[in-house]
Image (cartoon, rainbow, N blue to C red):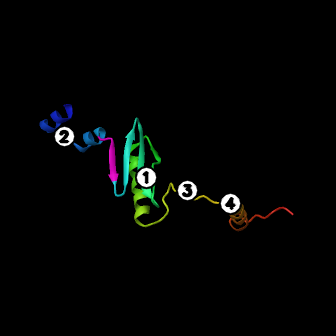
C-alpha cells in the first residue's frame, strides 16, 4: 500500500522499485533473491546452473551480464566446470611449470 501511495503522490522512482523487486533478468540469465543472498539461474549446455552471486545487487547484475555475454558468444561461462582426469591434471601441471614458470623437475 505504501508503494502505491508513493506512486500516486509523485514520489515514484526506480530506486523504490529496485528495493521492492526480488528478481531481475538480463538476457538469458535470471537473478533472484533468497533471504539476503542473490542467486543466478541460467542454462548452459542443456543443464541448469544456479550459482550464488552474493549479497550485493549491483555485483549480481554485473555477474549476470558477464555470464549472459559468454552464453551469447558460445564461450564457457565464468562459473562453468570442466571435469578432467587425474593424468590430464598432472600433465597440465607439469606443462605449466615447464613453460610458464620455467622450472623443471629436480635431478
Tell me the distance, in whole angstroms, between the alpha carbons under discs 1 and 3.
16 Å
The vertical placement of 7 against 83, above or below, is above
Looking at the picture, how far across and down is residue 83, in whole percent? 60, 58
Judge left or right: residue 33 versus residue 82: left
User: Is disc 3 surrounded by few (<14), some (14 to 19) or many (20+) residues within 10 Å?
Assistant: few
Label total for image: 4
Q: Secondary structure at mark 1?
A: helix
Mark 4 vs 2, N-terminal side = 2
Check residue 12 in the rendering and tell me which mark sits there, or answer none. 2
Q: Secondary structure at mark 2?
A: loop
Magenta residues, as a range?
A: 21-25
Reading the image, the residue beneath label 1 is 63
Reading the image, the residue beneath label 3 is 81
Q: Nearer the viewer, mark 1 or mark 3?
A: 3
Q: Which residue is located at x 29 percent, y 41 percent?
A: 21
Mark 2 vs 3, N-terminal side = 2
Tell me the distance, in whole angstroms, between the alpha carbons under discs 3 and 4.
14 Å
Reading the image, the residue beneath label 4 is 89
Tell me the distance, in whole angstroms, between the alpha carbons under discs 2 and 3.
43 Å
Mark 3 vs 4, N-terminal side = 3
Amino acid at each position: 500500500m505504501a508503494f502505491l501511495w508513493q506512486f500516486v503522490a509523485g514520489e515514484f522512482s526506480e530506486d523504490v522499485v529496485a528495493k521492492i523487486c526480488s528478481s531481475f533478468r538480463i538476457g538469458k540469465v535470471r537473478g533472484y533473491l533468497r533471504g539476503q543472498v542473490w542467486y543466478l539461474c541460467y542454462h548452459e549446455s542443456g543443464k541448469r546452473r544456479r550459482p550464488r552471486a552474493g549479497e550485493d545487487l549491483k555485483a549480481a547484475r554485473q555477474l549476470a551480464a558477464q555470464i549472459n555475454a559468454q552464453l551469447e558468444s558460445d564461450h564457457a561461462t565464468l562459473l562453468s566446470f570442466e571435469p578432467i582426469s587425474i593424468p590430464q591434471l598432472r600433465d597440465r601441471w607439469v606443462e605449466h611449470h615447464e613453460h610458464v614458470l620455467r622450472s623443471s623437475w629436480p635431478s
